[in-house]
Amino acid sequence: MGRDLSALFDPISVAVVGASDDPAKYGHAIAAQALRANGRRPLHLVNRRGGTVLGRTAAPSLSALGEPVDLAVVSVPAAGFEDAVDEALSCGARAIVAITAGFAETGDAGRARQRAVAARVRAAGAVMVGPNCLGLADNTTDLFLASDTFTPGGIALLSQSGNLALELQLRFRPHGLGFSRFVSLGNQADVTLVDLLVDCARHEGTEAVAVYAEDFADGRAFAEAAAEAGKPVVLLTAGRGDASARSAQSHTGALTTSADVVGAACRDAGVELVATPRELTVVLAALNGARRASGRRVAVLTDGGGHGVVAADAVEAAGLAVPELHQPTRERLRTALWEQSAVANPVDLAGMGEQNPHSYADTVTALLAAEEVDAVLMTGYFGGYADADATGGLGGGGTVLADGEQAAARLIAARHRATAKPLVVQSMYPESPSCRILAAAGVPVFGATEDAARALAVTTPGAPYPGITPLPAPAPPLHESGYLQTRRALEAAGLPFPAAREIRDERELIAATGEFRGPYVLKALHLLHKSDAGGVALGLAGPDELLAAFREMHARLGAASYSVEAMADLSDGVELIVGVDRDPRFGPVAMVGLGGVLAEALHDVAFTLAPVTAERALRRLRALRTAALLGGVRGRPPVDLSAAAAAIETITAFAAAHPEIAEIEVNPLLVRPHGVLALDSRAVLARPVPGPVPGPVA
C-alpha cells in the first residue's frame, strides 16, 4: 500500500518554522501562501524573535505553542536545521517539509548530516520531504506550502526543479490543465519519488502524474510503481547527454542514468517519456479526458496544401498512418465541398472555408464518421477569421466570416462530444476566439504541427507495455568469471554451446581432436576481449591446421590455457548479441541486437529491464531495424525466433539471479533455422566495495 503520507497532504495542523516578514526570505513566501488556506486548519507561524509575522502573532519556538503540530515546514539556516527538526518531532510532528539547503548536494559531510536527520525522522514514525526542497501544495485539501500559487486541476507534479513547475503552469493554462498537487522532491532523504508516485496513484483528485527527475534513487522501484499506477505517468528527465549530465551533478549532486536505460524502463512500465516541458504539456493535454483511438489511421483536414503535406509528414514521423480514404467517404465529402477540394487524404478545402466556414464542421463530421479513420487532425488557418476580426483585420467583411467560423467551432465541439474518436487541431491562431471554443470543449489545440502529431500519437494504441518482471531470488554467487567458468554456468542454466575442451599444451590439443571432429575454433583464455587481442582462430579444418594455429598464437600471446571448440556452421544462421549490464539505479538491464562483428558497427540493439520473458524477448527481436534478416532474405531460411527468445530468457534470468555480475554478454548467439548455439560469452564481476555502502540519495 505504500507509506502513509496523509500528514503531508492533509495535516491536522501546520507550523511554518522560519516564517518572516522579509520578502527576501523563503519563510516569508511559504507563510504568505499558507495563509491562503483561510482557516482550513490551525496555522502557526514561528520566528525565533517572536512578535508578529504578516500581521499574525508569531511564536518564538514550536514548544512555545503549547499544543501538538502535525506538519512542520522548516525554513531556517542550515546551522539550526537539526535542532528545528528535533523540536518538531518532540512536538508530535508526523510530517516535515524541509526547505533548508546545505546537505547531500554539498558533498560527503552534508550527505552524512542528511542521513542522520532522516534516520531520526523515521525512528520517530514521521515522514520528511527534502531537505533542499521548495515545498509542496495540494489544491484538493487547501494546503499551500510552496512559494507560488498553482492553478487547480488533475495533474500531480513531482519535480526536482521549482522553475520548471512555474514554466509548466504557464504552458498548462491554454490547455485548461491544472495541478492537483505539487511536490518539490529536493534531496529525497526520506520521502522518495517512488513514495510520492504511489500516493498520487491512489489520490482521487489526481488524474495523471507528471515527473521531472534528474536522478532515480531506485529506478527499478519507480518503474514498478509507474507500471502499477493505473493512471498516466509522464516523465521528463535530465542527463541524457554529457553536458546535461554535468549540469545535473553540479546542481543537485544527482547521478544520471543513460538514455537507453531510462527509455527501456519507461517502455516496460508504460511511462510516456518526453524531452522538454513543451512536449510534456502536449502529452498531458492529449491525455486529458478519456478519448483514445482504436487504431493508428489519421485523416488530415487542411485549408491549404502546404499545411496538409507538412501535417501528413509529421503524423507519419510520429509512427501513425495517413491512409487514402475509401470511396464512400470521398463521395460524402464531394457532396459537401466544391470541385477543387481534395478528398483523398489529406483533405484540402482549397479555399472553401472562406466561402463557407461551416465546411470545416461538415468535413470534420464526415471524417469522424468514416470507418477507415481512427483520429482526425485539422491544420492550417482555422481560427484566423475570428482572430482577424478581433484585431481589426479582413476589412469590413471580417465579422461575417468570424461569426461563421465561431459557429463552425461550436458545431465541431458538439460533433467531438458525440464521438469517442480523438480530434486534434493545429492552428496558426491557437489563441483566437474560435480555437478557444474548441479548447474549452476538450479539443486539444496547438500552434505547432509536430505538437499536434505527437498528441495524436499519445492517444493511439501502441504495443502493450509488459510491466516489470520481478527479480528472482539470488543464486549461489560466482567467484570466478573466466570464459570457461561463465560458459559452464550458462550451460548449467540451459544455454547450449558447441563442444569444447580446455588445453594447455600440444599433447592435450591432439587429445581434444579425438573427442570431436573439425572444423575447429581455437581461443586463448583469460583474455576478456579475445578477438581484439588476436586470440581467436576460426575455421581450422583439421588437426594440422589447429596445431599450427596453436603454435603461432601461443608464441604471440603465451596464454596459460586455450579452448578448442567445434566450429559451428554459420551458413544459414544469424548472429545476435545478448548482454546484461547491472545499472546502479535500475538493476539488470538487458540488451538484444544483431551481434558478431556487426554489433558495434550497426548498433541495432534494443533494451529492456531484466529478466526478460521469452514473450517480451520475441517483441524486442521483431522491433529491431534488421528484423527482416531473422525472417529469411535472398533465399536464406527464416531462423528459429522461439529458440532465440528462450535463450534470451535463460541468459537474462541467469544474470538477474547473480547480482555479483556487473556485466555478462553472449556474442555471438547463433540463431539457426532450428535451435541456437552460444558461440562465445564473457562476464565481469562487480568490484567489492570497501566498508559500509551508503543508502541512495538523490
Image: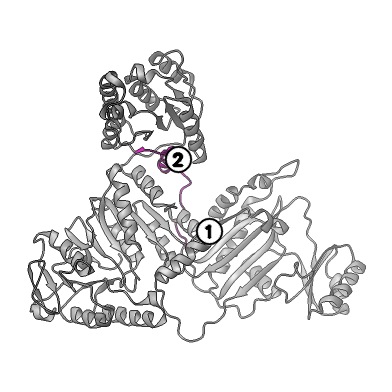
Could you tell me which quadrant the C terminus lies in? bottom left
Task: Judge whether 358 appears above or below 419 on screen.
Answer: above
Q: Which mark is residue 260?
A: 1
Look at the image and give the residue range highlighted in magenta. Answer: 445-469
Graded by Cα atoms within 10 Å as few (under 14), some (14 to 19) or many (20 or more), the crowding at tag 2 reads many
Answer whether residue 447 is visible to the viewer in this image: yes
Q: Amino acid at mark 1?
A: Asp
Could you tell me which quadrant the N terminus lies in? bottom left
Q: Nearer the viewer, residue 29 or 509?
A: 29
Would you name the residue on which mark 2 appears?
A: 450
Point out the frontmost of discs 1 and 2.
Answer: 2
Residue 143 part of the magenta-drawn span: no
Q: Residue at x 29, y 21 (%)?
A: 395
Where is residue 83, by image quadrant? bottom left
Q: Earlier in the sequence, mark 1 or mark 2?
A: 1
- Position of residue 530 measured from the top left corner of the image (x, y, whole percent): 74, 70
- Position of residue 221 measured from the top left corner of the image (x, y, whole percent): 41, 65
